[in-house]
Amino acid sequence: MYWNHNSAYYPWVKKKTADCHTVLDVGCGDGSLALFLNDGEKKIVGIDTDSYCIGKALSEKSGENLTFICQSFEEYAPDMTFDAIVFVASIHHMDMTKALKKARSLLSFSGKILIVGIAKPTTIMDWALEISRVLPSKVLSALHHMHTTEELKLTTSYDFPDMKVIRSIVRKELPGAEIHYGLHYRYLVEWSE
């Protein structure tokens, strides 16, 4: 499996979904996270609007428990609920408020939402943190021979929301959730009902 700033968080997602039976990967790209999470028992659904990415995911698919669908999250109407709904570097591609409302409506009892997101710093503390993450991120990227999303031909958007907007939306839509800052310019959110 390739390594980049998103796949660096796959082990975190795997740990957080260890007890989940159904997982929805929103903005699944080439399906690498779904494949990483696949233990042969979980029912994993990956959705993405990019037909090239879904084609790659389908070509790597192993097992009947994996499903990949070329569709927007807004249009997606499943006939099931999910124990976990995961957004890895994808929620900035959509209206975050609408996406979180929809995700909450698709959760099973005590289900969880996991976000590995990207945002622009807005406060002095945000900027200080951003600067402190540069060197470790560069070193780890070199050590792991990072593959960029452009190299992998995955859909990329550099139109990131402001961190203050993220904080406001998370407070409103995911009450009680905490935002944690990770390496590689990412923030992490875990929330459950």
Image (cartoon, rainbow, N blue to C red):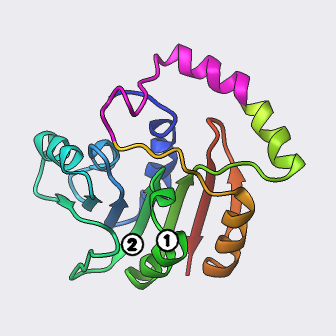
Task: Confirm whether the magenta stretch covers residue 79.
Answer: no
| Element on which disc 1 rests | strand
Residue in view at x 41 percent, y 24 percent: 147
Q: Which amino acid is tagged 1? A: Lys
**20 left or right, relative to 182:** left
Q: Farthest residue toward the right?
A: 124
Q: Which residues are magenta?
A: 134-154
Give percent across and percent down for residue 149. Answer: 40, 34
Give percent across and percent down for residue 159. Answer: 55, 50
Q: Farthest residue toward the front?
A: 159
Give percent across and percent down for residue 62. Answer: 13, 45
| Element on which disc 2 rests | strand
Q: Are marks 2 and 1 in contact (CB under 8 Å)?
A: yes
**133 left or right, relative to 102:** right
Give the answer, above or below, for where 188 lies relative to 113: above
Give the answer, above or below, for where 88 lies relative to 5: below
Give the answer, above or below, for where 133 lies relative to 162: above
Give percent across and percent down for residue 66. Answer: 18, 56
User: Residue beneath label 1, please?
Assistant: 112
**156 left or right, relative to 160:** left
**115 left or right, relative to 154:** right
* Other residues around mark 1 within 10 Å, as few (<14) / some (14–19) / many (≥20): many
* Other residues around mark 2 within 10 Å, as few (<14) / some (14–19) / many (≥20): many
Task: Decide which of 7, 76 is in the foreground and name it.
Answer: 76
User: Residue beneath label 2, please?
Assistant: 83
Residue in view at x 79 percent, y 31 percent: 132
Q: Which amino acid is tagged 2? A: Asp
